[in-house]
Protein backbone atom coordinates (compact mmCIF):
# COMPACT_ATOMS: atom_id res chain seq x y z
CA UNK A 1 0.00 0.00 0.00
CA UNK A 2 2.78 2.43 0.89
CA UNK A 3 4.44 1.81 -2.47
CA UNK A 4 1.21 2.45 -4.36
CA UNK A 5 0.61 5.75 -2.55
CA UNK A 6 4.20 6.77 -3.15
CA UNK A 7 3.89 5.94 -6.86
CA UNK A 8 0.83 8.19 -7.20
CA UNK A 9 2.31 11.10 -5.25
CA UNK A 10 5.74 11.09 -6.90
CA UNK A 11 3.98 11.88 -10.19
CA UNK A 12 3.25 15.31 -8.65
CA UNK A 13 6.23 16.27 -6.47
CA UNK A 14 9.25 14.69 -4.76
CA UNK A 15 8.07 12.46 -1.89
CA UNK A 16 9.93 11.63 1.31
CA UNK A 17 9.11 9.59 4.37
CA UNK A 18 8.93 11.08 7.85
CA UNK A 19 12.36 11.66 9.34
CA UNK A 20 13.96 12.00 5.91
CA UNK A 21 13.89 15.80 5.86
CA UNK A 22 17.60 16.19 5.10
CA UNK A 23 16.91 15.47 1.43
CA UNK A 24 14.17 18.04 1.08
CA UNK A 25 15.98 21.10 -0.26
CA UNK A 26 13.80 21.73 -3.33
CA UNK A 27 10.22 22.85 -2.74
CA UNK A 28 7.44 21.95 -3.17
CA UNK A 29 7.77 18.46 -1.76
CA UNK A 30 5.63 15.95 0.13
CA UNK A 31 6.15 13.82 3.20
CA UNK A 32 4.17 10.56 3.38
CA UNK A 33 3.39 9.32 6.88
CA UNK A 34 1.22 6.46 8.15
CA UNK A 35 -0.72 7.25 11.32
CA UNK A 36 -2.60 5.17 13.86
CA UNK A 37 -5.52 3.08 12.69
CA UNK A 38 -9.09 3.76 13.73
CA UNK A 39 -11.56 1.03 14.65
CA UNK A 40 -15.23 1.69 15.42
CA UNK A 41 -18.45 -0.29 15.29
CA UNK A 42 -18.93 1.08 11.78
CA UNK A 43 -15.56 -0.08 10.42
CA UNK A 44 -11.79 0.15 10.51
CA UNK A 45 -9.51 2.59 8.70
CA UNK A 46 -5.80 3.08 8.26
CA UNK A 47 -4.90 6.76 8.42
CA UNK A 48 -2.35 8.41 6.13
CA UNK A 49 -1.02 11.96 6.32
CA UNK A 50 0.55 13.74 3.36
CA UNK A 51 2.36 16.89 4.45
CA UNK A 52 2.76 19.45 1.67
CA UNK A 53 5.71 21.88 1.86
CA UNK A 54 6.14 25.06 -0.18
CA UNK A 55 8.62 27.95 0.01
CA UNK A 56 7.98 30.29 2.95
CA UNK A 57 5.31 32.83 2.11
CA UNK A 58 4.13 31.16 -1.12
CA UNK A 59 0.59 30.33 -0.05
CA UNK A 60 -0.66 30.15 -3.62
CA UNK A 61 1.80 27.34 -4.39
CA UNK A 62 0.88 25.60 -1.13
CA UNK A 63 -2.83 25.73 -1.97
CA UNK A 64 -2.23 24.53 -5.53
CA UNK A 65 -0.07 21.64 -4.35
CA UNK A 66 -2.68 20.63 -1.76
CA UNK A 67 -5.41 20.63 -4.41
CA UNK A 68 -3.28 18.44 -6.69
CA UNK A 69 -2.64 15.90 -3.92
CA UNK A 70 -6.31 15.73 -2.93
CA UNK A 71 -7.35 15.30 -6.58
CA UNK A 72 -4.71 12.61 -7.14
CA UNK A 73 -5.83 10.47 -4.18
CA UNK A 74 -9.39 11.20 -3.09
CA UNK A 75 -11.88 8.55 -4.13
CA UNK A 76 -9.27 6.59 -6.08
CA UNK A 77 -8.94 2.82 -6.04
CA UNK A 78 -5.20 2.16 -6.10
CA UNK A 79 -3.67 -1.19 -6.97
CA UNK A 80 -1.35 -2.63 -4.38
CA UNK A 81 2.06 -3.10 -5.94
CA UNK A 82 2.87 -6.19 -3.85
CA UNK A 83 -0.36 -8.06 -4.72
CA UNK A 84 -3.45 -7.96 -6.93
CA UNK A 85 -5.58 -6.22 -4.30
CA UNK A 86 -6.82 -2.64 -4.50
CA UNK A 87 -7.67 -0.12 -1.83
CA UNK A 88 -9.78 3.01 -1.64
CA UNK A 89 -8.33 6.34 -0.49
CA UNK A 90 -10.66 8.95 1.00
CA UNK A 91 -9.79 12.55 1.89
CA UNK A 92 -10.77 13.44 5.46
CA UNK A 93 -9.52 16.92 6.33
CA UNK A 94 -6.46 19.15 6.58
CA UNK A 95 -4.52 21.09 9.20
CA UNK A 96 -4.07 24.81 9.39
CA UNK A 97 -1.12 26.43 7.63
CA UNK A 98 2.13 25.85 9.52
CA UNK A 99 5.40 27.77 9.38
CA UNK A 100 8.52 25.59 9.18
CA UNK A 101 11.34 28.03 10.00
CA UNK A 102 14.06 25.37 9.96
CA UNK A 103 13.13 24.45 6.37
CA UNK A 104 12.29 27.94 5.15
CA UNK A 105 8.86 26.61 4.27
CA UNK A 106 5.16 26.67 4.96
CA UNK A 107 3.22 23.43 5.16
CA UNK A 108 -0.16 21.84 5.52
CA UNK A 109 -1.09 18.28 6.50
CA UNK A 110 -3.69 16.46 4.41
CA UNK A 111 -5.36 13.52 6.15
CA UNK A 112 -6.71 10.50 4.29
CA UNK A 113 -8.35 7.27 5.43
CA UNK A 114 -8.17 3.84 3.84
CA UNK A 115 -10.99 1.43 4.74
CA UNK A 116 -9.80 -1.95 5.98
CA UNK A 117 -11.90 -5.02 5.19
CA UNK A 118 -11.07 -8.29 6.95
CA UNK A 119 -7.36 -9.10 6.96
CA UNK A 120 -6.61 -7.16 3.81
CA UNK A 121 -7.60 -4.04 1.97
CA UNK A 122 -10.52 -3.97 -0.40
Image: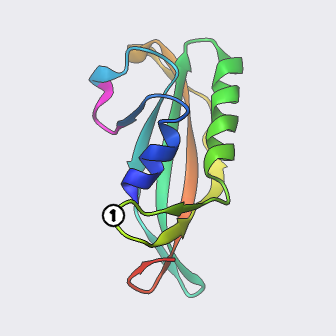
Residue 84 location (% of width, % of height): 42, 71
- The residue located at (66%, 36%) in the rendering is 68
- Report which quarter residue 72 is drawn in: top right
Write down the region rendered in magenta.
Answer: 17-21
Magenta span includes 77: no
Question: According to the image, label 1 marks what residue?
Answer: 82
> Tag 1: Cα neighbours inside 10 Å, few (<14), some, or many (≥20)?
few
- The residue located at (55%, 82%) in the rendering is 43
Quick check: 103 left or right of 122?
left
Quick check: 72 left or right of 6?
right
SS at mark 1?
A: loop
Residue 117 vertical placement versus 78 (above, below): below
Residue 122 location (% of width, % of height): 52, 77
Residue 37 vertical placement versus 13 (above, below): below
- The residue located at (56%, 88%) in the rendering is 41
Residue 60 location (% of width, % of height): 71, 19
- For the view shown, which residue lies furthest in the front direction? 84
Quick check: 92 left or right of 8?
right
Residue 45 location (% of width, % of height): 50, 71
- Give the camera-side residue of 73 and 104: 73
Residue 88 vertical placement versus 28 (above, below): below
- Report which quarter residue 81 is drawn in: bottom left
- The residue located at (67%, 60%) in the rendering is 75
Amino acid sequence: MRSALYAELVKLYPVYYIGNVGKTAKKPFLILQFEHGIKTRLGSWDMVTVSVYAPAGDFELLDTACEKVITALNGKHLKRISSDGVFLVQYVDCSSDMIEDSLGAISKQLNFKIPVFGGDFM
